[in-house]
Image (cartoon, grey):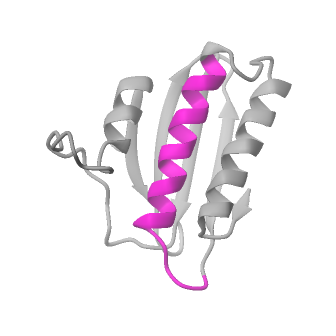
Amino acid sequence: MQFTSSRRGARLARLLAVRRLDTWGHPRGGPVSLKVETVVAELCANAVLHGRVPGRDFHLAMRLRVDGVIRVEVSDARRERVPVLGQPWPADEESGRGLLLVEALAERWGVAERRGVGKTVWCEVKA
C-alpha cells in the first residue's frame, strides 16, 4: 500500500494494517494486533519523520507467512538515513524510542536497500 509522507498517511497506514490483521484472524485489540499495530505505527512514523523526501510517498507491505509470522515492511525514498538502534534516551525526551519498541515486540528486524531508490525497514512478529 502506498501512502503520502505525512502524519495522516502514517495514521491511515496503521488503521489499514489493523483492518488487514482482522481479516487474517487477529482482531483489533488482541495481543497480536496490538504488537503489529505498534510496530507499524513506529516504522511509518520514522518513514514520515526521517525518511521523507518531498513529493515521494512511503509504502507499507504486510505478509502472513505459513508459519504464522507476520512480516511488516515500510519503505521510504531516503537511502542515506538508515535507522540504527541508539543509546537509551533521557527520560524527558519525547522521541527516540521507536526502534527500541520494534526490537522489543518483533522477533527480528533489519534494513534493506530498496529497488530503485530508498530503503526498506522490516520486522517480523510472531503470531
- Residue at the image point whose x is 41% and y is 35% from the top: 102
Horizontal placement of 122 versus 94: left or right? right
Instruction: Please state which of residues 41 and 83 is positioned toward the viewer in this rendering.
Output: 41
Which stretch did the figure color magenta? 32-55
| Residue 107 shows in this picture | no
Q: Position of residue 104 (x, y in %)?
A: 36, 25
Q: Main secondary structure of the magenta part?
A: helix
Compared to 38, does 118 lie above or below? Answer: below
Q: Quadrant of residue 7?
A: bottom right
Q: Quadrant of residue 82?
A: bottom left
Q: Position of residue 67 (x, y in %)?
A: 63, 15
Q: Position of residue 72 (x, y in %)?
A: 58, 40
Compared to 51, does 16 lie above or below? Answer: above
**Total labels drawn:** 0
The magenta stretch spans residue 48:
yes
- Residue at the image point whose x is 77% and y is 44% from the top: 16
The magenta stretch spans residue 15:
no
Instruction: Please state which of residues 86 and 69 is positioned toward the viewer in this rendering.
Output: 86
| Residue 55 shows in this picture | yes
Q: Position of residue 42 (x, y in %)?
A: 48, 45
Instruction: Please state which of residues 90 and 99 is positioned toward the viewer in this rendering.
Output: 90
